Amino acid sequence: NSAIAQAEPLEMSHLILGIVAAMLIGIAGAVILEKIYFYAHFGLSLLYILVGYGVAFGLHLFTKRGGVGMGALAVGIMVAGLLAGQLVLTSDIVNMAHGAGPGATGITTSMMFPVLLAHMGIMHWVCIAIGLYFCFSTMARRP
């Protein structure tokens, strides 16, 4: 309790900067991975582990705080980044379908998003889960 009482309160500006940095790392990492997957036609699922660590690092860099609450915040930020990356991939696939011919004009991003999630392989989901674990545990064990 004495360590908690002596800790300086987290300034709102540091929290906002940490969240913004973590969001940029999460979104950029996920979008880069999805672009590689779209253009190279293979996934680098193991890099999701680095994205998880990067999100936690970015959040901790500005906040200098850790704990379970900050770990949960980091996981939420990573999930938002992963969803943004999936939306970019979905948009790329829809644009490619629309360019293929007039028969694909009815395809929308909202139609394709659940289809893409359903077709992700087990290795993809395992690496995302490991990345989320690293994201949470990196923040949770920091002072």
Image (cartoon, rainbow, N blue to C red):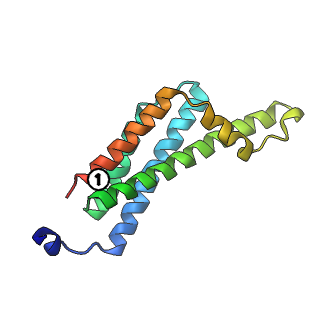
For the point 31% across and 74% down, which residue is it? 11
Establish if 52 lies above or below 139.
above
> Compared with residue 74, is residue 105 higher up or lower down, i.e. above or below?
above
**Residue appearing at x 27%, y 53% in the figure:** 140
Image location (x, y in percent) of residue 77? 45, 55
**Left or right, 93 with reference to 25:** right
> Three-letter amino acid code at disc 1?
Met
Residue 53 visible to an observer of this rendering = no
**Residue 99, quarter of the rendered image:** top right
Q: Residue at x 12, y 68 (%)?
A: 3
Q: Nearer the viewer, residue 89 or 112?
A: 112
User: Measured from the top left, where is residue 111 in percent x and y?
Assistant: 74, 43
Task: Residue at 55% x, 47% y: name it.
Answer: 83
x and y percent of residue 54 in the render?
A: 36, 46
Q: Is residue 101 left or right of residue 79?
A: right
Q: Does residue 36 appear to the left or right of 18 in the view shown?
A: right
Q: Secondary structure at mark 1?
A: helix
Q: Is residue 142 visible?
A: yes
Which image quadrant: the C terminus? bottom left
